Image: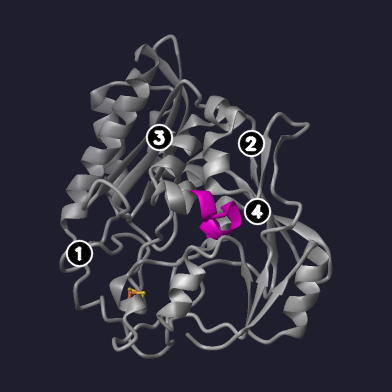
Amino acid sequence: MRPFIFSTAQTADQALSTAIEAKDAKYLGGGTNLIDLMKEDVERPSQLIEVADLSWNEIRKNADGGYSLGAMCSNADTANHTAIRQNYPLLSMAMLSAATAQIRNMATNGGNLLQRTRCPYFFETSMPCNKREPGSGCGALEGDNHNHAIFGWSESCVATHPSDMCIALAALGAKIQVQSVDGSTRMIDFSEFHRLPGDQPESDNNLKSNELILSIELPKPQFANHFHYLKIRERSSYAFAMISVAAGLEIKNGEILNVALAMGGVAHKPWKLKASEDFLKGKAPSQENFKEAAELAMRDAKPLSRNQYKVEMGKKAIVRALSEATDRKSN
Ligand code: SF4
């Protein structure tokens, strides 16, 4: 591990001013991803600015009926918070499927948004990887890409986004509040927060230089009765999704009034299934309609040499997640 300067910020302004003065500084929340990457020599910040003590560590109800999740609040406290379990059980379920209890206790909401891909070539510094070393090539493109993207990839990078929390946030239509270096704040639609690799795979998101995440803003609660987060992985714990589906339905008198649907494990960012959502609105929650929605979702998939299986698995996962969400109220 390379030497670095460590400092602690008590306020967002202090964190930002320290970051501006430093070169290649990183904010440190729980450190569950960043410290691992520093040990592997993948991340090489000159300075860590600990932000875990900032006041953005609460969950509170907003005037519009939505909820604000502090960026420094832990994943465990968020997932187990009574208001989140009652009003956003899809988010709670997704978060509790991630990692281990110990890691969820340490990991922060802001850090979860910024966690980096688990592509094995990214971690292996002797292999080419455009995300780690821009211009070095992509080891996975013609290599072992069995757990890589089937949507939105480029020749530069075929990695997938690793977070479970973010798949639920994409389905629910969250926003991210950030503070910029000039002290101003802005909201970023969740769909615009993460980015596809294009020819700049080293950038995972659309944050500007040194911007600090303050909170995740959730819209008014929906989908609290009919929801399911399905995660398919290579082992039953402490593994990242091969495919995941976050599904929420609002059903009245046998008709789907509203739908929230997103997939993980298939793209460089959480993959919102807009065409499938639009198709299902106004329809009956039937197997036939769920299968049609799944076909629509996978219509534009472009599998790589070793992950063709994700297309069929993805269809089945969508149907199953929607079916579980429909049946949940009677459980
Ligand atoms: Fe690196 Fe992306 Fe290629 Fe993986 S898929 S080796 S992260 S460039």
Q: Which amino acid does label 4 sit on?
A: Met
Q: Please report the bounds of the magenta region as a residue range.
A: 105-113
Q: Main secondary structure of the magenta part?
A: helix
**Mark 1 highlights which residue?**
146
- Residue 234 shows in this picture: yes
Q: Which mark is residue 247?
A: 3
x, y percentage for residue 48?
A: 63, 76
Residue at disc 2, secondary structure: loop
Quick check: is the Cβ at mark 3 less than 8 Å away from ligand 1? no
The alpha-carbon separation of the residues under discs 1 and 2 comes to 35 Å
Against 312, residue 207 (above or below) is below
Sequence-earlier tag: 3 or 4: 4
x, y percentage for residue 175?
A: 63, 48
Q: Nearer the viewer, residue 159 or 19?
A: 19
The alpha-carbon separation of the residues under discs 3 and 1 comes to 25 Å
Against 268, residue 299 (above or below) is above
Sequence-earlier tag: 4 or 2: 4
**Mark 2 highlights which residue?**
219
